[in-house]
Image (cartoon, rainbow, N blue to C red):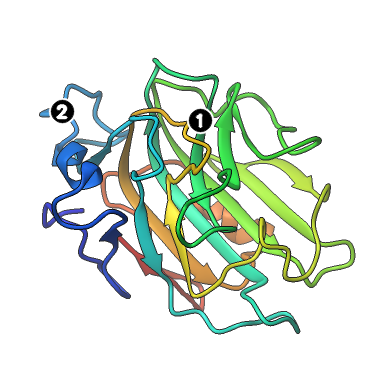
């Protein structure tokens, strides 16, 4: 977010879910972490985006990822999403990171921060409890709904949290992507917090464990577009 808007380093710019005059844009702010009252990222200050914490299904950022359907299904079943993110310390006990099941954000979000872990549903929040609110973290969710069993592998700051296999399946609307998804959207309007994002990236395909280890923790330089031969799309 170096340009102070929703433009992308690689790929298509994000869009405000409710348009140029809606709640999302009104509550969004850009600036250095220090200017927004936050600690710097490990290694130095960085330009970040403030995500409003309103409990409204109008809040979110539309992500047109341009990834073709894969994994043998009609949707995107193999992908990786990465955030350099700071979760606010006040608000509900869970907060949405990603909405995949409704392009209009009319139902529950599909990936949440909760209790210093992240996931969704029964068996979805296993981890080391290190995704703490009030601190910068690099969070990775790597999806492969074509695997046997289908799995989402979760990392925080380069450390593996879990191979999450509960409630996964090919073309599952809560795990796979249509042509767009919504960052931080929760259609139920009850699980959102103020957040700050230094960088967010989505990649086609599930990164390997070695690649997720190599990503490490958050950096003021943002997320690398190239890890080995893998190409990603970053904001």
Using the rendered image of the protein, determine whether residue 225 is visible from the camera's viewpoint.
no
Residue that protrudes farthest toward the top in the picture: 90
Mark number displayed over residue 9: none
* Disc on the earlier residue, 1 or 2: 2
Q: Is residue 180 above or below residue 132?
A: below
Residue 116 relative to residue 217: left or right: right
Image coordinates of residue 157 in percent, x first then y, are 52, 39
Residue located beneath label 1 in the image:
191
Residue 36 is marked as 2
Q: Which numbered mark, 1 or 2, is in the foreground of this view?
A: 1
Q: Secondary structure at mark 2?
A: loop
Q: Name the residue at 58% across, 60% down.
A: 211
Q: Nearer the viewer, residue 157 or 57?
A: 57
Quarter residue 14 falls in: bottom left
Quadrant of image for the C terminus: bottom left
Residue 187 placement (x, y as % from top left): 49, 44
- As measured in the structure, the alpha-carbon distance from the residue carrying label 1 to the one carrying label 2 is 23 Å
Left or right of 62, for residue 230: right
């Amino acid at each position: 977010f170096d340009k102070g808007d929703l433009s992308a380093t690689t790929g298509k710019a994000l869009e405000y879910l409710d348009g140029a005059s809606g709640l999302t844009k009104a509550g969004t702010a850009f600036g250095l972490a220090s200017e927004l009252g936050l600690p710097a990222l490990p290694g130095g200050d960085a330009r970040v985006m403030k995500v409003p914490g309103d409990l409204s299904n109008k809040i979110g950022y539309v992500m047109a990822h341009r990834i073709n359907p894969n994994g043998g299904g009609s949707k995107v079943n193999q992908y990786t999403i990465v955030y350099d993110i700071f979760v606010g310390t006040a608000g509900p006990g869970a907060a949405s990171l990603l909405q995949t099941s409704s392009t209009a954000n009319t139902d529950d979000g599909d990936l949440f921060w909760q209790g210093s872990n992240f996931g969704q549903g029964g068996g979805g929040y296993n981890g080391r409890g290190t995704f703490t609110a009030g601190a910068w973290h690099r969070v990775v969710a790597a999806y492969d709904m074509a695997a046997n069993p289908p799995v989402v592998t979760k990392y925080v700051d380069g450390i593996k949290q879990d191979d999450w296999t509960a409630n996964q399946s090919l073309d599952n609307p809560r795990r796979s992507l249509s042509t767009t998804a919504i960052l931080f959207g929760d259609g139920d309007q009850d699980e959102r917090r103020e957040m700050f994002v230094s960088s967010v990236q989505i990649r086609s395909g599930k990164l390997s464990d070695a690649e997720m280890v190599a990503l490490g923790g958050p950096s003021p330089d943002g997320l690398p577009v190239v890890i080995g031969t893998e190409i990603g799309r970053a904001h």
